[in-house]
Image (cartoon, rainbow, N blue to C red):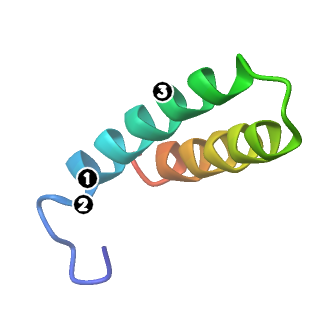
Amino acid sequence: MIADSPFAKKYCRLCAEVCEWCAQQCQQHDHEHCQACAAACTKCAQECRVHMV
C-alpha cells in the first residue's frame, strides 16, 4: 500500500470478503472463542474496506 501497488485495493477487497465470511460462520456458534473470532473478523473487514477507497 505504501508503494502504491496496483493490487492493494484488490487485496483489501478479497481480505474484507474473507473476513466477512468468517465472521458470519463464527457468529452462528455460541462459544466464547467463536464470538471473539467473529468480532475480530468484523473489525478486520471494516479496516480492509477503509483501504479500498
- Residue that carries the numbered disc 1 in the rendered image: 11
Q: Are marks 2 and 1 in contact (CB under 8 Å)?
A: yes
Badge 1: few (under 14), some or many (20 or more) residues near its Cα, within 10 Å? some
Q: Residue furthest left?
A: 6
Distance from disc 2 to disc 1, alpha carbons, whole Å, reads 5 Å
| SS at badge 3 | helix
| SS at badge 1 | helix
Q: Position of residue 38 (x, y in %)?
A: 70, 37
Badge 3: few (under 14), some or many (20 or more) residues near its Cα, within 10 Å? some
Q: Please give the name of the residue rendered at 48% of the width and 50% of the height, measured from the top-left corner.
A: 48
- Residue that carries the numbered disc 2 in the rendered image: 8
The amino acid sitting under disc 2 is Ala
The amino acid sitting under disc 3 is Trp
Distance from disc 1 to disc 3, alpha carbons, whole Å, reads 15 Å
- Residue that carries the numbered disc 3 in the rendered image: 21
Q: Please give the name of the residue rendered at 88% of the width and 41% of the height, measured from the top-left corner.
A: 32
Q: Residue furthest front?
A: 31
Q: Are marks 3 and 2 in contact (CB under 8 Å)?
A: no
Front residue (pair 21, 47)? 21
